[in-house]
Every structure is written in structure tokens, then in C-alpha cells.
Amino acid sequence: MNIGDDQTRCAAKRLREPASSGGESQEEESENDESEEEEDESGEVVSQTQENENIDQENREFNMALLNVRSINKYIIRENNIIINLIRSHNLHFFFITETWLKPDSEGDEVLSNLLPQNCNFIHEPRPGRRGGGVAIVFSDEFECSKVDLGFTPETFECVAGRARQRNRDSTFLVVAVYRLGEESKTTFSEEFDEFLQKNKENYIVVAGDFNI
């Protein structure tokens, strides 16, 4: 994934006109024009180079993955921790999880903490009131990621969103994990998800999930 403006390639050409043979004064005028042109173009090149450097600094490729676990608790009893292996082997910066089946209490935090590499943090949203569901976003400690208030309570999907920023950088982006309840209306889901996007605007948004469409 590229974070930042679209890749831009700026180039400047210096156009040099051959000196005319119309006399000394004309040669001097031509040389003066060329000198002014070089100064102007030199300034332009510096400006464009700086712009390219800024763009390159903003462009970053992040490794991301999504997994529907259908109960994350079952990974606790496995000797071979698939989640840790997946994160490490693919050097994931963000890992989206759906159907965590975690309870809305501190136990869910403990389960996630025990299942993840030490260099990872997480935000998650359990399903309230009944079994199943739940979404989580795991992120590398190269990033800061604060949980975002959705601004409303959706009825057709479960969601957790975080405003993320790579450490030592200013630009932020939104990361969103979604689990759509399969029995709910697709039209209503579309309307609700659009409402979510309108309430949580960001220049760059990453959405991953199980949409059951």
C-alpha cells in the first residue's frame, strides 16, 4: 500500500538556443537571456527536487493481512501459534482479524496480548450482548494507532477503526476492520457504511474485512 500522493515524476529541461551570428550585441543579449533562463530553471529544478523528496518521504509500502479466525481462543491451545507465525513470516505492519468471539471484558485484552508477538499492539471491538462476532486490528510498534469513536452504532456490521501514524511522521491514515452480519440487508449496510465514512473522513483509508456479500 502506498501512503501519500500518487507517484510523481518531475523533470526540467534546459533549452539552449545556438548563438546567432548577428553581431556582438546580439551575442551578448543571447548570453544574458541564456544566463537568466538557467537561473530561473535552476530555481525550478531545486523546487521540483524538494517536492519529489517530500513525496518519496510520504510514500510507504505497508504489509497487511486479514484472517477470519472464528474464535481466536482456539489458538491458545495450539503449540504452533499460527497468528504469530503469520505476522512474523510476512513482516506484517497491520493484521486485521474478524470473528474474534471475544467477550466484552478485560479477558479479551489478555487473550490478544498472549497470542501476539511482543512488538505488536492491538485495538479491538467485541460483539456486545451475544456470542460470536468481534473485530480486531493488530499493528506493529513501528506505528501509533488510537481507537476512533465511530460516531454512531451500526446495526448491520461490526467495526473497529484506528487513526494510525508511523512513528516520527506527521501524516495519519485510517485503518478499519469490518465484519458484516450476513443476515442483514445489503442496502442498509451500504447506507450505514457510507454514514461511517462521512463521519470519519481521512485523506487515506484502509478497509479490510469479511463483508459476506
Image (cartoon, rainbow, N blue to C red):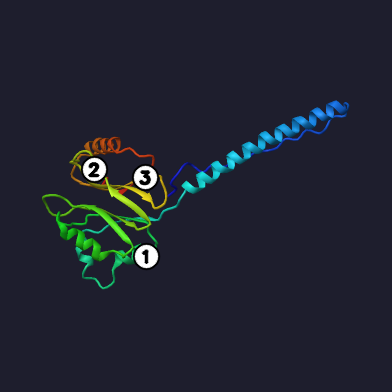
For the point 56% across and 43% down, the residue is 50
Q: Position of residue 103 (x, y in %)?
A: 15, 56
Q: Which residue is mark 2?
A: 149
| Amino acid under disc 3 | Phe
Q: Which residue is mark 3?
A: 173
Q: Position of residue 204 (x, y in %)?
A: 38, 42
| Amino acid under disc 1 | Arg
Residue 41, placed above or below residue 3:
above
Q: Position of residue 128 (x, y in %)?
A: 14, 49
CB within 8 Å, label 3 to label 1: no
Of pointers 3 and 1, the one earlier in the residue sequence: 1
- Name the secondary structure under disc 1: helix
Left or right side of 38 for 134: left
- Name the secondary structure under disc 2: loop
Circle 3 residues within 10 Å: few <14, some 14–19, many ≥20: some
Query: What is the distance, in whole Å, between disc 3 and disc 2 at their CAs?
Result: 15 Å
Q: Which residue is mark 1?
A: 88
CB within 8 Å, label 3 to label 2: no
Image quadrant holding the C terminus, namely top left
- Name the secondary structure under disc 3: strand
